[in-house]
Image (spheres, helix red, strand yellow):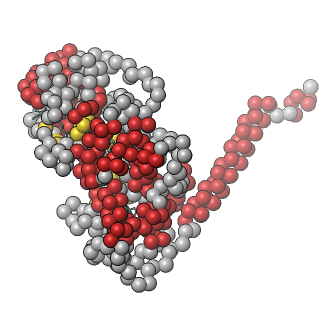
Amino acid sequence: MSWRRAAPKPARTAVRRLLAVALGASVLLLIALAVLIGRQLSVEALPPLAAQTTPTDPALIARGAYLARAGNCAACHTARGGQPYAGGRAIETPFGQVVAGNLTPDPEHGLGRWSADAFWRALHHGQSRDGRLLYPAFPYASFTQITREDSDALHAFLRSLPPVAQPNRPHALRFPYRSQAALAVWRALYFESGSFQPDPAQPADWNRGAYLVRGVAHCAACHAPRDALGGVAAGHEFDGGFMAGQGWYAPSLRSRFEAGLAHWAPQDIVDLLKTGVAHGSTGAAMGPMAEVVFHSTQHLSDADLHAMATHLKSLGRDAEPPPPPAPRADPAQLALGQRVYEAQCTDCHGAQGEGARQAYPPLAGNRALTLASPVNPVQAVLNGGFAPATAGNPRPYGMPPYRTLLSDAEIAAVITYARQSWGNQAAAVSPLDVQRLR
Ligand code: HEC
Ligand code: HEC
Ligand code: HEC
């Protein structure tokens, strides 16, 4: 019998073994992390440019200017009311503010001492000239796909700008996110530099579109779902995501119940990106998307927009069940919503939510209204808005803001009414949903 007592209890042995394995695993993990962090942080500074050379090839500069439009560089790298590309705009992230710096060729504060190699390394690897790791609020997860030739053209264009001696503002990030070690861990988890690989099975315009959409035009910077650390799981770049700190949702470019484009005519996609409205498909760009159209996509060539449309159409999922109809809202809320709708909204959007062709979007069957998250329709009603004024649509129709006219309860009710009328079956919106975005 004694051998029985001498032997440790089997359950305990198992626990000990498990603990040993876990301990071993965490030690290994720590070592792996240390190696990764070390490798990320050991990047050297690149030598400064010895002589100030001004680029002279006008074709190269023009190509760089076009790519800068496609990449919307000025939108982030220009402060409100500031000199173009001189930096100073803070980008909101869940971890604090990251300030986009001065890209003009000022030697002290801008890129004046940056060689083409240093510039390429920033776009491709997300590292500054001095080796510092850059925050992914700078969309290098997309820009890593930019070719060396296009990087050199962008560099030449930026060097052709007048230098602006505007110092950079420091970032305002919370601990521990401001440490380079935290960034190194983040990059080890989520970032891999890569170059664009054309798919030989696809036609040239699909590949050109893929290069633009996934690379320089960085559509995934907003349209990707992000986890608690702000990372995007591979393969989910276009599944739709919340824009941290901005109260907007960039809908999925794959789902036909959000902003998927598989069933759109290519010309409607081109119209949306070029003019901000797609009359054939009842789309209208609002909020941050209106800015993308205004600053960036309206300036792209028709050939490039058609290429993007070809690629965007191919992102659609094959089979996808419709979301289940949401439970019916409280009758009192619906009654209030109907009263507000009839008083405020019918003139433009129609008694049956039918809209007015070429002017006011229909609300019946409108994907932007029936998204699972109500943030975008709440933004639309709170702040009103215009589609962007573009060459193709110079005087867009607008919607008045209801921020001061209607209470949170009234705005929630009118949106709920519209989300549950004329065949729409989306979930009710609460006054709290509205209050959060005020
Ligand atoms: C969504 C906003 C955004 C867009 C669009 C954007 N940038 Fe930036 N960029 C940033 C932010 C923020 C930083 C600062 C990152 C940091 O310091 O960690 C930055 C940093 C940089 C840097 C590194 C500067 C330095 O001093 O290390 C370069 C170079 C740069 N951007 C070039 C570009 C170019 C070229 C484009 C257009 C093709 C572009 N950026 C578009 C936000 C943006
Ligand atoms: C700065 C963030 C941001 C970027 C970058 C961005 N989007 Fe959007 N996009 C949004 C938001 C927010 C919406 C929702 C508002 C709306 O419906 O217009 C949206 C809406 C859309 C819609 C739906 C419009 C409609 O009326 O149905 C399409 C299509 C779209 N985006 C395509 C793109 C493409 C293609 C790119 C890249 C060229 C891109 N977006 C880049 C934020 C962004
Ligand atoms: C003066 C005309 C007008 C009135 C009144 C008006 N809207 Fe709009 N509405 C528009 C226009 C124009 C747009 C497209 C704006 C854009 O593209 O930014 C729009 C867009 C919207 C959208 C986003 C849909 C989409 O496809 O992008 C919603 C939701 C909406 N309106 C709801 C309402 C509600 C609810 C009311 C009443 C409280 C209302 N609107 C009153 C003209 C109007």
Residue at 40% in and 40% down: 310
Left or right of 147 on screen, residue 219: left
Residue at 91% in and 30% down: 3
Locate the N terminus by quadrant.
top right
Residue at 47% in and 57% down: 144
Q: Position of residue 419 (x, y in %)?
A: 24, 24
Q: Position of residue 280 (x, y in %)?
A: 25, 32
Asked if one can make out residue 95 in the rendered structure from this viewpoint, the answer is: no
Q: Where is residue 298 in the image (x, y as percent from the top left)?
A: 26, 50
Left or right of 280 on screen, residue 314: right
Left or right of 327 on screen, residue 226: right
Residue 36, quarter of the rendered image? bottom right
Q: Is residue 286 above or below residue 190?
A: above
Q: In this view, does 174 lie above or below 343?
A: below
- Counting the numbered discs, the total is 0
Asked if one can make out residue 276 in the rendered structure from this viewpoint, the answer is: yes
Q: In this view, does 189 lie above or below 49?
A: above
Left or right of 62 on screen, residue 391: left
Residue 89, quarter of the rendered image? bottom left
Ligand 1 positioned in quadrant: bottom left
Q: Position of residue 171 (x, y in %)?
A: 36, 62
Of the pair 6 and 339, the residue shown nearer to us: 339
Of the pair 8 and 220, the residue shown nearer to us: 220
Of the pair 336 and 269, the residue shown nearer to us: 269
Locate the C terminus by quadrant.
top left
